[in-house]
Image (cartoon, rainbow, N blue to C red):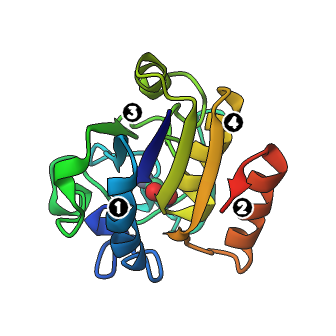
Amino acid sequence: MKALLIIDVQNDFLPGGALAVPRGDEVINAVNLLIPQYELVVATQDWHPPDHGSFAAEHPRRGVGDVVRLGDLDQVLWPTHCVQGEHGAELSNELNHADIHHVVRKGTDPTVDSYSAFFDNARRRSTGLAEYLRSRGVDEVHVAGLATDYCVKATALDAIDLGFRVVLLQHAVRGVDLQPGDCARAIEAMRDAGVEIR
Ligand code: VGL
Ligand code: ZN
């Protein structure tokens, strides 16, 4: 049984948002066309407290794109985005919400970022998504959404580690490309790990 994972199609990652992914809006129509092809559809929401440690505003003398230490991990600093309860954190209202069965929220701990839908970046806590999927007989996940080089990549790699078959739906993802080539490298890393690029 396969499930569709729709990663972070939230206002702040779309044009006009705080952390707009270039051409991020192009995934909306692609995802809406995919949804009816799946019996189980899960969406994720990046869901940060206002003082999240990934926000440049929390680090005096540092700016967006700088890398700092957060806990024991390297952390890219982002503009303030996807703050819990704010418009930027809402799933796009152009998405077909009626057929999304479950929503996973991540990034709630201010001391660690959480790119993957399964675990925080330090792997201290699970979101419960793997258990949710397994309890419904899911053995294959198809990944779409934003951003290819961050949350999509982390989710696909964790899904492989957790033993799922994983397909990246290339036409339905877009990435940040902070450094040119990041998205291409992310796709190669997913392919090398055993993700089917489709
Ligand atoms: C994401 C950067 C910061 C993502 C989330 O959804 O890929 N990227 N927070
Ligand atoms: Zn975030």
Q: Earlier in the sequence, mark 4 or mark 3?
A: 3
- Name the front one of labels 2 and 4: 4
Q: Is mark 3 within 8 Å of ligand 2?
A: no
Disc 3, SS: loop
Which residue is at the front of the view, 32 or 114? 32
| Label 2 Cα crowd, 10 Å radius (few <14 / some 14-19 / many 20+) | some
Left or right: where does residue 30 sit relative to residue 134? left
Q: Which residue is mark 4?
A: 160
Q: Which residue is mark 3?
A: 109
Looking at numbered disc 3 in the image, what kind of residue is underneath it?
Asp
Query: Which secondary structure lies at badge 4?
Result: helix
Q: Which residue is mark 1?
A: 9
Q: Is residue 74 left or right of residue 47?
A: right
Of the image marks 1 and 2, the number of the one nearer the N terminus: 1
Marks 2/4: CA distance?
14 Å
Residue plotted at (25% across, 52% down): 83
Does label 1 point to a residue whose CB lies under 8 Å from ligand 1? no
Kind of residue at disc 2: Ala
Q: Are marks 1 and 4 in contact (CB under 8 Å)?
A: no
Q: Nearer the viewer, mark 1 or mark 4?
A: 4
Q: Is residue 144 depicted above or below 178 in this figure?
A: above
| Quarter of the image with the C terminus in it | bottom right
| Residue 76 placement (x, y as % from top left) | 58, 57
Q: x, y percentage for residue 101?
A: 26, 39
Relative to residue 137, is residue 43 drawn left or right? left
State the CA–CA distance, disc 3 to disc 2.
25 Å
Residue at mark 1 to residue at mark 4: CA–CA distance = 22 Å
Q: Which one is in front in this view, the residue at disc 3 or the one at disc 2? A: 2
Which numbered disc covers residue 186?
2
Disc number lying in front (4 or 3): 4
